Amino acid sequence: MSLRIVVCVKYVPDATGDRHFADDLTVDRDDVDGLLSELDEYAVEQALQIADEADDAEITVLTVGPEDAKDALRKALSMGADKAVHVEDDDLHGTDVMGTSLVLAKAIEKTGYDLVIAGMASTDGTMGVLPAILAERLGVPQVTLLSEVSVEDGVVKGRRDGDTASEQLEASLPAVVSVTDQSGEARYPSFKGIMAAKKKPVESLDLDDLDIDAEEVGLEGAWTKVDSAAERPARTAGTIVKDEGEGGKQLAEFLAGQKFI
Ligand SMILES: Cc1cc2nc3c(=O)[nH]c(=O)nc-3n(C[C@H](O)[C@H](O)[C@H](O)COP(=O)(O)OP(=O)(O)OC[C@H]3O[C@@H](n4cnc5c(N)ncnc54)[C@H](O)[C@@H]3O)c2cc1C
């Protein structure tokens, strides 16, 4: 039987561009370019490697995000995933991690799965908690932060590297895993892959399709609330210490003044 892999990929604002808050203190996603979160490319790569080793496997890439999030799906498809699911709905505006995990869980259940692979954290929210919440919602084991992952005989195995030890972990399928940026370089899409991706199916779903009420998501359903936010002040020119014999002393005084020493 085919191994059904679902990879969660997030479309994030480009960190090299200007980013701003909207009036309701959500991230302004309208005027910024976005891209597939770099850390999710590792998740796609591991899915492709697991599929290569399996007799028969199908990889679905899944995103919850605005219209432009299709770009992230296309990139994952051009790397080699088979099909994509895009959940988009105006009522998702302001959804926090609890709502996002609910939507992903419902979409994953609708798609069907044996293994869910996520990145270790998104490059914008960087909470790193979504995979664990997702596993809880799906009622399946979670094996997170893996730097090595494989599937054999209905069991997912992996290595989690900590500061002082490495753990070998395994769980029976179905399960949720997340992979780190140490799991292996993600491949670049080939020209053939980019052309093939244009013909691969992208299914669009909204909240109705997933039987989710608008009140369960969005700002109304969020468990967290942003009370205030301020843009980071522009960088100042900095202090230049010219060494005319007293450089070391001045440097020490500067560091002491900043409470670094
Ligand atoms: C239209 C829209 C508006 C939003 N507005 C807000 C808001 O105002 N306030 C707020 O707190 N949050 C908002 N979110 C949700 C937020 O962007 C995150 O998706 C969510 O909070 C998860 O946090 P994280 O990205 O830090 O997750 P992490 O736990 O860091 O993510 C780990 C992994 O989970 C997967 N993942 C995370 N998010 C998604 C996703 N959307 N689709 C597919 N896979 C995913 C990826 O594999 C990722 O590597 C919004 C999301 C959408 C789609």
Image (cartoon, helix red, strand yellow):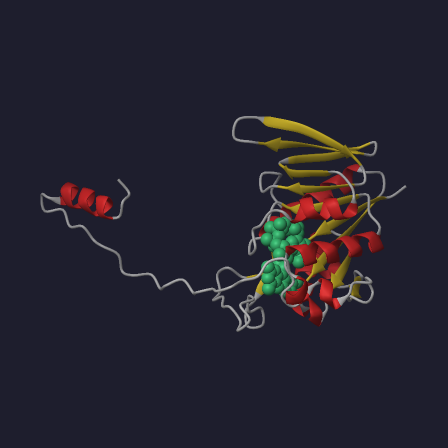
Q: Quadrant of residue 77?
A: bottom right
Q: Residue drawn 76% across and 53% down?
A: 105
Q: Can you say which quadrant of the picture contains the N terminus?
A: top right
**Residue 93 in view of the camera:** yes
Q: In which quarter of the image is residue 220?
A: bottom right
Judging depth in this view, the residue of 252 and 74 nearest the camera is: 252
Q: Is residue 164 left or right of residue 138?
A: left
Q: Residue drawn 72% across and 50% down?
A: 7
| Residue 14 vertical placement versus 54 (above, below) | below
Q: Quadrant of residue 147?
A: top right
In this rendering, the count of numbered labels is: 0
Q: Can you say which quadrant of the picture contains the C terminus?
A: top left
Q: Where is residue 78 in the image (x, y as percent from the top left)?
A: 70, 56
Q: Position of residue 34 (x, y in %)?
A: 58, 64
- Residue at the outermost left position: 245
Q: Where is residue 150 in the image (x, y as percent from the top left)?
A: 73, 34
Q: Residue drawn 69% across and 35% down?
A: 149
* Quadrant containing ligand 1: bottom right
Q: Residue drawn 68% across and 66% down?
A: 92
**Residue 10 in view of the camera:** no
Q: Position of residue 71 (x, y in %)?
A: 66, 63
